[in-house]
Amino acid sequence: MFIDEAEIYVEGGRGGNGCASFRREKYRPHGGPDGGDGAAGGNVVLVASQNRSTLVELQKVRHYRADNGKRGGPKNKTGATGADLEITVPPGTLVKDETSRPLADLVVSGQEFIGASGGAGGRGNASLVREAGAVPHFAEKGEPGQSRTLCLELKLVADVAIVGFPNAGKSTLIGRISRARPKVAEYPFTTIEPQLGVVQGDEIDFVVTEVPGLVPGAHQGKGMGTGFLRHIARAAAILYLVDLDPYTGREPFLDLVTLEGELRLFNKGLAGRTRMVAANKIDLNPPDDAVEMLREECGKSGLDLFMISAATGEGTGLLLKVLETTVMRVREEGPLAGTTITHTPVPVEDKMEVVRQRDRFVVKGRRVERMVLMTDWNNDEARAHLASMLRGAGVEKMLKQAGAMEGDEVEIEGRIFEYLPDEG
């Protein structure tokens, strides 16, 4: 089954807790702090691999979590880092967040993208001496890993996209010119999923994709149009295949007009691609006027026209030479814009803000949220240290500016505090 969309939930591993311990040596029963730091949790990493051709596996398992980091130990022992979790996806996979913002475009086999980062390890009490006093009796907890939903969309990586209406002969042509063997029959919609084939040229090999038959209104999703049209996005050249069969009752030049219109409405950028027309089934002796009107329409749009028969192979030799030359030229110019670039989100500014919600003040900001998440709430000394850090980060000042009064409730990362301003 060809699956070209999937939605998965990814979660980085939690960081390991820091260790609170003290040296216990002969003649030194009350030595200084020697608790080691916890280690970072593992990342969830998406990797493009030629061993994958669809996203079907990600439809079966949708929740992925990397290993947690290990806790620190006494004698300043640092924990072991959590193992990364790799998810293999087909080359051509576009990764988006829940708002449809592109995060990564994994085109080349081996490209990687960190879908969810592991949390930082907590500091042991040996590392807290400088800021918490000479003898801290607490350590930090590990930070939770990043978690989010990722929307994956597969756009096949092909050099040439063959586009045409149902039963125009696309499957026959791709079977003729490549090593692909798609299903072929004399009725519309034989092909219900995109097909890939490798063409052996004189100088290079290149990949062609047969996009399942389009129908008018495909750009609006009719006939699964948008689901199929996305596979044209990466092609260096677009080959319109027009049916010359005189018994279909169709006008070849009108089919071309419709195909051009559907692609333009779907993605205006496709108008800048190299486009050409192959008029198929010349072995059926199409009417001269039909061929002439098609030729005139190609002239208006500046499209090269090739007369072929996918069934007998007539005219396909010249067509393949032109396609090979086009692919070679595009490869020399470099990849199409955006096709091999991994997009990394712009780092979110660590801006702290106070928002009033009903009878409570909510403090937001990555830095202070991490402080709360990594605090050991079962330890009085750790909670006192947190209060000191929050005050140093300017939380108390911002609460006062927001109108907080003594005794008001303050919420940070789900924890509720009572606002008690420092009298000093």
Image: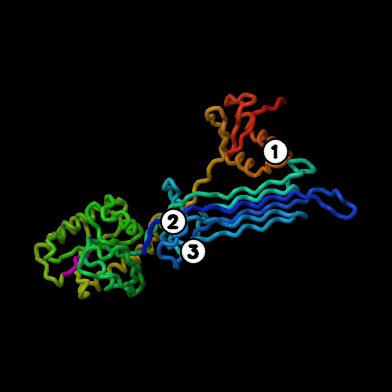
Secondary structure beneath disc 3? loop
In space, the residues marked 1 and 3 are separated at their CA atoms by 45 Å
Of the 4 image quadrants, the one containing the C terminus is top right
Q: Which residue is mark 1?
A: 383
Disc nearer the start of the sequence (1/3): 3
Q: Which residue is mark 2?
A: 105
- How far from the left and from the top, in percent, is residue 107? 43, 60
Is the residue under label 3 in contact with that under label 1 (CB below 8 Å)?
Answer: no
Total marks shown come to: 3
Q: Which residues are magenta?
A: 277-281
Relative depth, front residue between 255 and 271: 255
Q: In front: mark 1 or mark 2?
A: 1
Q: What's under tag 3, amino acid-wise?
A: Gly
Of the 4 image quadrants, the one containing the N terminus is bottom left
Q: What's under tag 1, amino acid-wise?
A: Arg
User: Is 360 on the left or on the right of 197, as rendered?
Assistant: right
Residue at 73% in and 44% down: 138
Vertical position of residue 132 compared to residue 152: above or below? above
Vertical position of residue 38 compared to residue 181: above or below? above
Relative depth, front residue between 323 and 2: 2
Disc nearer the start of the sequence (1/2): 2
In space, the residues marked 2 and 3 are separated at their CA atoms by 12 Å
Vertical position of residue 381 compared to residue 162: above or below? above
User: Is 22 on the left or on the right of 416, as rendered?
Assistant: right
Please tell me in which quadrant of the rendered image residue 328 appears.
Answer: bottom left
Q: Which residue is mark 3?
A: 110
